[in-house]
Amino acid sequence: MSAPLTATAIAHPNIALVKYWGKRDVAENLPAVGSLSLTLDAIRSRTRVRFEPGRKGDHVLLDGREDQAAALRVSACLDLLREAAGVTHGALVDTDNDFPTAAGLASSASGFAALVTAAAAALGLRLPLHELCRMARIGSGSAPRSLFGGFVLLQPSPDGDVGVEPLLAPDSWPLRVIIAITAAGPKAMGSRAGMAASRDTSPFYSEWLRSHPADLRAGRRCVEARDFPALAELAEASCLKMHAVMLATRPPLIYWSPATLACLQVVQALRRDGVPVFFTIDAGPQLKAVCEPAAAATVHEALAAVPGVVRLIDSGLGPGAHCIDD
Ligand code: 2P0
């Protein structure tokens, strides 16, 4: 059967509970550390890929606009798929996100997971999962995590590559995530440049690398045991350790807004009062509060009252990337 040459896929952003920050190999986009994430269901990237025989080059639309920087990364990723399929067709790629792009909400993770899923289907490729993960990783280090649903572990493997392992399906531990959007514009410095700056200048970077494997092992134990209090403590510590590395980078990487800190303090106060919730923050000013389902309404209400919070997104845990009908 010939390849359909066109396909559309959906992938959901993921939120890391044990964070990834730093690269071991820039050309291969190999992370210096593993990570543990959960995939969301309330927000998504949708990517349509159409290969056209005889077309030279790719044309990339991101939320309806041409984006040169995104196009270069998309083409690098598509080159791997073209090579696997033995074709040279250029592609039309149309991606839209139903949430703010490049604002610390993992749009590159869901975008590249959707891209490789759609492109592989369009080219009729049945790739081993580790190959699809490698291709997604070339696009974005956190993208392999969005190929899977629920809780996902990304771990450096002894051969120097990374392995991705789904730990729990979404309904096995159905936590809720309340995202407090405190600013919707794109961030000042992208993760890629920020990671390179931290590696080169942050005095805490070596300690981050040294202590990370133990955090990842602890993260796996917490998720497998569904131990919320232990996961809460670990995830907040991993988040703040990463932000300490960022703050000590020269020039400093300060991704928080005053409202980010206000939200963090609200979450701390809730937990002190016995509400099962913890925070995590990525390379942007949004705060993600992870809680048990029964606490979601309380957490939502408390974050909605924080000055500077412009919007809240309530999410459950979602599935991995998948194709949909065009
Ligand atoms: C994470 N972040 O683990 C961490 C926490 C941001 C802070 O993965 O350069 O967009 O494409 O590999 O995947 C964001 O980094 O970076 C990220 P690249 P990516 O979620």
Image (cartoon, rainbow, N blue to C red):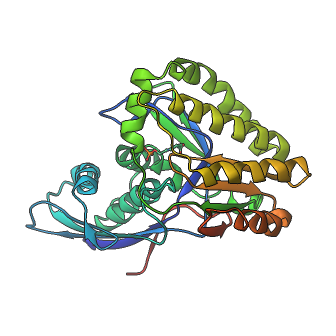
Q: Is residue 190 above or below residue 21?
A: below
In-image side of 56 versus 134 (left or right) = left
Q: Is residue 156 visible?
A: no
Q: Is residue 324 above or below residue 214?
A: below
Q: Where is residue 96 in the image (x, y as percent from the top left)?
A: 39, 71
- Which of these two is toward me, 219 or 5? 219
Q: Where is residue 63 in the image (x, y as percent from the top left)?
A: 34, 71
- Which of these two is toward me, 132 or 260? 260
- Residue located farthest toward the right when viewing the structure as drawn: 274
Q: Position of residue 255 (x, y in %)?
A: 51, 45
Q: In this view, does 200 lie above or below 112?
A: above
In-image side of 134 versus 162 (left or right) = left
Q: Quadrant of the N terminus?
A: bottom left
Q: Which residue is drawn at 55% across and 68% down?
A: 43
Q: Position of residue 48 (x, y in %)?
A: 33, 72
In-image side of 28 versus 151 (left or right) = left
Looking at the image, how many numbered discs can be counted on the residues? 0
Q: Residue at x 73, y 32 (%)?
A: 218
In-image side of 288 versus 104 (left or right) = right
- Which of these two is toward me, 1 or 248? 248
Q: Can residue 39 be seen in this view?
A: yes
Q: Residue at x 88, y 47 (%)?
A: 272
- Which of these two is toward me, 271 or 48? 271
